[in-house]
């Protein structure tokens, strides 16, 4: 019986798991006799297996430290008290943790507006590097942010990202034309944005993720 | 040590025979430990899972039905425990990443598994490719090759159709093969 390479490969795979009946086995071996390609495939699968097993054995054939049967015996019969203690402990940890996260969040929200607006042109915080993907905006003040221009950015796309207008960006940077150059820094006036578009506060307060941009910008030429 | 008959062990353990309990634990602890170790990759965590597995098994022993072999039943418990440890670890990892982002601090990253015994670049490739498989595929490969279980046994332990096990094995092997092929090609 003639079979395709695709079917032969499937049979090879099944054969590896000892799941072929006699007829399938003979079909496969007939095909393999004439097909160099599938023989090579079978060899490759065999090679994978021959490497896999010793690697796993060396990694995991360890002797366990002997278990204490007494502990198992004791824990098996004392179910309820352990559970109450565990539940209480877990609940307490969760509450403390939630409180912590909440306070961090509140702090992040409140610390932004409290900062006095710094005058335009204050030297940037020396964090941004071209390699960093997460910190592309350096927090300078409430109203101004430094933004490192990326490849393929246009003034429009930047203005769109920050829900501001390109005129405002041009004014803030005393720009004469709309051309922007990658790897240069732009001051972005943020507090003046019009309320039509909202910015995720997390993006402003902490990080700037390029993937976010990819979904919000309009493609440019 | 000769192996005691499973049904005798079960009835004696339920009756509270401590010698039988000890036999039960000694008979299966190595395989349960190795199963846990192969899934979570950390020996301290694997011992913990082994202990949890026996405690859980002894508690539900009265409900055990001999549809599954005792070993397969223990493996199922151990596997579920191991997966829940993996889940916890993933949650912890996500939390760590979030904290790192929010607070802009470096938190200590969990270092995983010991890779000291890799002997050749080929082995390293396969080992890496194995660890990059997703959990469902990785587990069947481990059960099939390291624990040398048949497809039928794996399907019993995971409560998944044999056809599904076959197809997971196929695609996992296919990935490992292409890794090796790629390596040969370079």
Image (cartoon, coloured by chain):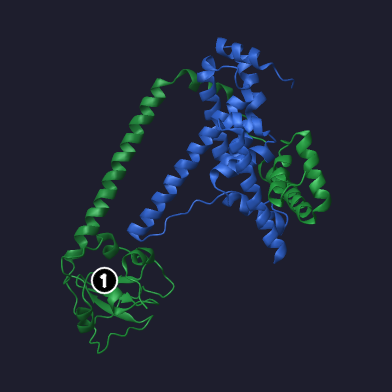
Chain colours: A green, B blue
Helix, strand or loop status at disc 1: helix
Q: Residue at x 38, y 30 (%)?
A: A86
* Residue B8 placement, left or right of A206: right
Q: Quadrant of the C terminus of chain A?
A: bottom left
* Residue A88 placement, left or right of A43: left
Q: Considering only vertical position in the picture, is B146 above or below A160? A: above
Q: Give the x, y percent position of residue A180.
A: 33, 83
Q: Give the x, y percent position of residue A192.
A: 16, 72
How many numbered callouts?
A: 1
A117 or B122, nearer to the observer: B122
Residue A61 in view here = no
Q: Which residue is mark 1?
A: A160
Q: Considering only vertical position in the picture, is B79 above or below B123? A: above
The outermost residue toward the front is A1
Q: Residue at x 62, y 54 (%)?
A: B128
| Snapshot quadrant of residue A19 | top right
Q: Quadrant of the N terminus of chain A?
A: top right
* Residue B112 placement, left or right of A115: right
Q: Give the x, y percent position of residue A202.
A: 28, 60
Chain letter belonging to callout 1:
A
Residue B19 in view here = yes
B108 or A159, nearer to the observer: A159
| Snapshot quadrant of residue A110 | bottom left
Q: Considering only vertical position in the picture, is A48 above or below B18? A: below
Q: Considering only vertical position in the picture, is B47 above or below B19? A: below
Q: Give the x, y percent position of residue A14.
A: 70, 40
Q: Residue at x 33, y 57 (%)?
A: B102
Q: Residues within 10 Å of mark 1 (few under 14, many from 20)?
A: some
| Snapshot quadrant of residue A200 | bottom left
B164 or B88, nearer to the observer: B164
């Amino acid at each position: 019986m003639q079979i395709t390479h695709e079917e032969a490969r499937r049979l090879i795979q099944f054969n590896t798991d000892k799941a072929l009946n006699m007829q399938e086995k003979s079909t496969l071996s007939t095909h393999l006799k004439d097909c160099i390609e599938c023989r090579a495939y079978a060899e490759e699968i065999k090679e994978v297996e021959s490497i896999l097993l010793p690697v796993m054995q060396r990694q995991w054939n360890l002797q366990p430290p002997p278990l204490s049967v007494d502990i198992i015996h004791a824990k098996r019969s004392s179910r309820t008290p352990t559970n109450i203690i565990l539940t209480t402990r877990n609940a307490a940890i969760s509450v403390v943790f939630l409180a912590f996260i909440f306070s961090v969040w509140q702090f992040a929200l409140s610390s932004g507006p409290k900062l006095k607006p710094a005058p335009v042109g204050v030297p940037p915080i020396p964090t941004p590097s071209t390699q960093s993907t997460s910190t592309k905006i350096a927090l300078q003040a409430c109203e101004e942010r430094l933004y490192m221009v990326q490849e393929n950015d246009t003034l429009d796309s930047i203005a769109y990202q920050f829900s501001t207008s390109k005129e405002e960006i041009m004014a803030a940077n005393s720009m004469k034309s709309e051309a922007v150059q990658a790897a240069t820094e732009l001051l972005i006036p943020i507090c003046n944005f019009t309320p039509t578009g909202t910015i995720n506060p997390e993006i402003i307060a902490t990080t700037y993720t390029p993937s976010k941009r990819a979904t919000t910008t309009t493609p440019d030429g | 040590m000769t192996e005691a008959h499973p049904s005798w062990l079960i009835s004696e353990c339920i009756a509270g025979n401590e010698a039988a309990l000890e036999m039960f634990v000694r008979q299966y602890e190595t395989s349960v430990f190795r199963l846990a170790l192969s899934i979570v990759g950390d020996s301290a965590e694997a011992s913990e899972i082994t202990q949890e597995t026996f405690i859980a098994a002894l508690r539900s022993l009265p409900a055990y039905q001999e549809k599954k072999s005792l070993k397969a039943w223990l493996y199922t418990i151990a596997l579920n425990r191991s997966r829940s440890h993996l889940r916890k670890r993933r949650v912890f990892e996500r939390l760590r990443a979030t904290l790192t982002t929010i607070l802009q601090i470096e938190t200590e990253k969990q270092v995983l598994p010991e890779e000291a015994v890799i002997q050749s670049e080929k082995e390293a490739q396969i080992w890496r490719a194995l660890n990059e498989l997703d959990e469902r595929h990785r587990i069947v490969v481990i059960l099939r090759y390291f624990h040398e279980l048949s497809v039928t046994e794996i399907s019993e332990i995971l409560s998944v159709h044999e056809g599904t096990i076959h197809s997971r094995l196929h695609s996992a092997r296919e990935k490992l093969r292409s890794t090796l092929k790629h390596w040969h090609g370079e």
